[in-house]
Image: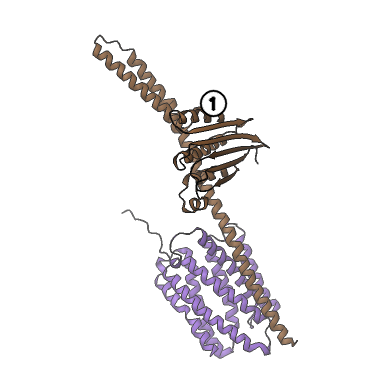
Amino acid sequence: MIYWIAFISGYSMVIAGIIGLIRFKSVPVAYQPFVYFTWLAFTNDVLSSILIPIWHTNAVNGNIYVLLEAFLFLWLFYNWGTLKEKSWHLPVLGSSLLLIWILDNFVLHKITLINSLFRICYSFVLVFLGINQLNAMIVGERGNMLRNAKFLICTGICIFYSYKAFLEVFYLFQSDKNIPLLNNVFLILAFVNLFVTFIYALAALWIPTKQKFTQLS
Amino acid sequence: MDPNQTKIYTAILIAAGVLGIILVYFVINIIRQQRKHLGFQKEKLQAEITTLENERRRIASDLHDDLGPLLSAVKLQINSVEVPDTEDQELIERSSIYIDNILSRIREISNNLMPQALARKGLVIALQEFIDNLTLGHPFDIRFSSVGDVSLAGDREIHLYRIILEVIHNALKHSQASTLDLHIKNENNSLIVDIADNGSGFEYNIVNKTGVGLGLKNIQSRVEMLKGDLYIDTQPGEGTKYRIAIPLYYI
C-alpha cells in the first residue's frame, strides 16, 4: 500500500515535467535548472520502479539522485541571485555538499544503502536558501505572489525539504522495532510530495517567458 | 526505559529540534530581509532628496546668476535709449518697470528654491528672514529664539532649514495654528530644535499609516539623513510638539 502511494506520489512530478517540456523554449535560462529537476525527479522514479523489483532497493540511484538534485537547486538559486551576494557562497556550499556526500556514501556508509546524513544536510541547505528567497519576495515583491513561479518553487522547497529533514532524523535512529513508525512517517512524506508536485506544476505553468526584443529588419 | 523507546524519543526530540531550527531561521531571516528592505527604501528616498536639493541649487543659481544679470543688462540698455517722442518714452519706462518686476520675481523664486541668506549668513538669519516674510501682513505669530552656535556644516544646514520650513508649513496649512514657538539651542554636542504650535494636532499613527503625511515622511527622511532623532508629541485638539536632536559631529 505504502509502495503504491509512494509510486503515485513519485510519478506526479510528470505533470510539472510535461509543462516544463512544452514551455521549455520560452523558459528563461534562470529557470531552466528547475525544469531539469522535474525531469530528473521523474527519471529517478522510473529508474526506481525498474530497479526495485530487480535489486529490491533503489539506494544507489537514490543516493546519486539527491546529489544531482542538490546541485540543480544550487544552480537555480545561483541564477536567482541568492548565491551571488558573496562570490564564495556557491563554491563553498557546492564543495561542502560534495564532501558530505562522499563521506556519507563511501567513508561512513556504503552507497548501496539509503544514507541519511547527506539528505539531512542538503535538506537544511535548500530550506535555508528557500526561506531566504521567500522572505526577500514577501518583503520586496509586488504583484500576485500565488502566480509567481519563484515564490511557488520556494514554497515547495521549504515544505518538502523541511519534512524531509524531519523524516531523515528518524531514519538515522532506525531499528527493526520502529519500522511501523517509519512507514507511517514515510507515508506522510508521500502526501507532502504529492502536494508539493502540484505546487511545482503550477510553478512550471507560471514561469515567466523570456524577455522579447524587437528585431530590426 | 526500553532501548527502542529511547531511540524513538531521541529521534522525535532531534526531529523537533530540526523543525525548531528551521522556524527560528525563518523568523531571523524575515527580520533581516525587512531591515535590508527598509535600508534600501531609505537610501532611495535620501538619494531622491539629494537629487532634489541639487536640482533646486542648480535652478536657483541659473536664475540668480545667469538670468538676473542678463535682464539687468537689458534694462540698462533700454533706459539708455533716448527718444524724442513722449509716448515712446512712456513705453520705455513701462518696459523698465516690467523688467524690475521680473527681476524681483526671479529673486523671489531663486530665494525660495535656495535661500541666499542661508549660504551667506547662516541658519538663524535665513530663518529670521523667512519668518519675517511669512508673518508680514499675516495673523500667524512665530516666536523664534536661538542659543549658542547653531550652525551645521555644509549641506546639513539646508536639510535642517527644510525640516523647520516643513513643520511651519504643516502648522499653517494643516493644523490651522495661530502661534508657533521655535527654539534652537546647542546642547551637549547636539543641535536641539523645539517647535510647538497651538493647532489642531493629529493622530500620529493614522497619519503615518495612511501615508497622508508626506510632509512628515519628508521630515523623517531628512532627520535620518542628519543622523538625528525626531520626537513628536501630538493629540487631536492639543497642538503639536516636535523635538529634533541633530548630532553636531558624527562618524
Residue A90 % position (x, y): 59, 62
Residue at the far front: name it: B237
Question: Circle 1 marks a residue in which chain?
Answer: B
Relative to B20, say whether A60 is above or below: below
The amino acid pointed to by label 1 is Arg
Relative to B52, say whether B208 is above or below: below
Residue at image x 55%, y 75%? A160
- Judging by colour alone, the chain drawn in brown in this rendered image is B
The N terminus of chain B - image quarter: bottom right
Tell me where residue A107 sits by quadrant: bottom right
Q: Nearer the viewer, residue A119 or B59?
A: B59
Residue B20 % position (x, y): 64, 71
Relative to B109, say whether A116 is above or below: below
- Chain A: give its colour: purple
Residue at image x 61%, y 40%? B246
Element at label 1 = helix
Residue at image x 34%, y 15%? B77
Residue A152 % position (x, y): 48, 69
Q: Is residue A77 left or right of residue B58?
A: right
Q: Nearer the viewer, residue B202 or B54?
A: B202
Callout 1: 10 Å neighbours few (<14), some, many (20+)? Answer: few
- Mark 1 lies on residue: B120
Residue at image x 56%, y 46%? B233
Q: Please say whether residue A198 is visible from this viewpoint.
A: yes
